[in-house]
Each structure stands twice: as structure tokens, then as C-alpha cells.
Image (tube, rainbow, N blue to C red):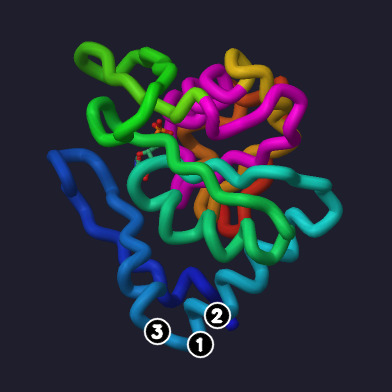
């Protein structure tokens, strides 16, 4: 099955000049969804992983299934103010201004092996900040995974310290 056939490209969303890779068309198709989840899990089967960290919000769509397949737990990294207990945060640069991500302080124990996942890597800034968040809490980032990599934006270069893997590339 060609998974790209199930990814919808939406020009000029959310703003002019951005070509948005929409995975909702893949998610709603039973066979495309199961094929995508199976292939995504197979990408990481050689890694010993304690925790899969999913980045809000579309990392939450792929992270838990992956965690189950790897016999790992799932940890959400969220936008500020969403997590109820004690958190640590990382600040990262956007095109205009900055943004923050948070993780529960007790989510990852020191020395645990962590795989970070999101749906798309564009510039890599979000994933880089998440790597810092995990590392600053004592976790070991053993991999960073994406369903879709936009290679023309070279986001992988920002993650050169990590084992970065993607299922589908554009
Ligand atoms: P970045 O930090 O630039 O790698 O952006 C990554 C985040 O933005 C991910 O959470 C993606 O879901 C989202 N994203 C960025 N660009 C796109 C795009 N062209 N299509 C779909 N999602 C995108």
C-alpha cells in the first residue's frame, strides 16, 4: 500500500505559503491506518525503549500504539498549562516569538530510554526542544521518530545528535 496516496496536501494552511500534510485522510481509512501503525512500529523494533514521548497534539495519535508495540509506557509532552502536576518546561523559537513545551517531572526516571514521536518533522524545532526536555530530566533519547519528514526543510540537521527515523519522506 502506498501511504502517500492517503495523505492530503492542503496548500496555504494554516497560512499562505505553507503546504500542510494532513493525516486525517490516512487516519479515517481502516487499511491505511493499520498499515501505517504497523510500519511505524516496525521502524523502531530494534530499539530497547522504556518510554515513548508523544508531542502535542498529533504525536498523541501515534505514540500510544507504538508504546504498546515496544512494551514501553507513553508520556505526553504538552503545551503550557495543560499538565496538572509538577512540570519542567523547555522554551523554543518560532518564526515569530517563542513557545514552550512541558512534561511532568515524574514522567521519566533518570536513565530511562526514550523514543520521541510526532506526526511531521518540518524545521525540527519542536522535536529539538522535546529532546532537551527529556535529557534535562535525566532521560536518554535513543531515537526520534516521525510519520512524515519534510526533507526540504532539513529539520533532521537539528537532530543530528539523535537517531532520527521517518516512515514517509517528501
Ligand atoms: P517543526 O518544529 O517546524 O518541525 O514543526 C513541527 C510541528 O508542526 C509538528 O508538530 C507538525 O505537526 C507541525 N507541522 C509543521 N509543518 C507542517 C506541515 N507542513 N504539515 C503538517 N504539519 C506541520
Circles 1, 3 touching at the beta carbon (< 8 Å): yes
The residue lying at 59 percent from left, 13 percent from top is 136
Assign a secondary structure to mark 1. helix
In the rendered image, residue 92, in percent from the top left (x then y), is placed at 37, 15
* Magenta range: 106-134
The quarter of the picture where residue 140 lies is: top right
Instruction: Tell me the residue that label 3 is attached to.
Output: 29
In the rendered image, residue 103, in percent from the top left (x then y), is placed at 44, 28
Q: Is residue 149 magenta?
A: no
Q: Is residue 128 magenta?
A: yes
Instruction: Tell me the residue that label 2 is attached to.
Output: 34
Q: Residues within 10 Å of mark 1 (few under 14, many from 20)?
A: few
Circles 3, 2 touching at the beta carbon (< 8 Å): no
Instruction: Tell me the residue that label 1 is attached to.
Output: 31
The answer for how far apart the CA atoms under marks 2 and 1 are is: 5 Å
Image quadrant of ligand 1?
top left
Amino acid at each position: 500500500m502506498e501511504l502517500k496516496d492517503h495523505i492530503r496536501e492542503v496548500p496555504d494552511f494554516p497560512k499562505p505559503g505553507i503546504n500542510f500534510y494532513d493525516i486525517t485522510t490516512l487516519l479515517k481509512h481502516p487499511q491505511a491506518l493499520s498499515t501505517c501503525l504497523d510500519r511505524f512500529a516496525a521502524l523502531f523494533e530494534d530499539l530497547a525503549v522504556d518510554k515513548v514521548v508523544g508531542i502535542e497534539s498529533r504525536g498523541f495519535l501515534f505514540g500510544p500504539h507504538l508504546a504498546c508495540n515496544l512494551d514501553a509506557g507513553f508520556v505526553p509532552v504538552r503545551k503550557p498549562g495543560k499538565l496538572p502536576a509538577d512540570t519542567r518546561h523547555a522554551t523554543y523559537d518560532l518564526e515569530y516569538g517563542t513557545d514552550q513545551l512541558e512534561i511532568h517531572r515524574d514522567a521519566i526516571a533518570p536513565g530511562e530510554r526514550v523514543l520521541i514521536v510526532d506526526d511531521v518533522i518540518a524545521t525540527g524545532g519542536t522535536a529539538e526542544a522535546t529532546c532537551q526536555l527529556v535529557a534535562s530530566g535525566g532521560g536518554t533519547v535513543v531515537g526520534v521518530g516521525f510519520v512524515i519528514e519534510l526533507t526540504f526543510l532539513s529539520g533532521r540537521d537539528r537532530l543530528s545528535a539523535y537517531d532520527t527515523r521517518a516512515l514517509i519522506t517528501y
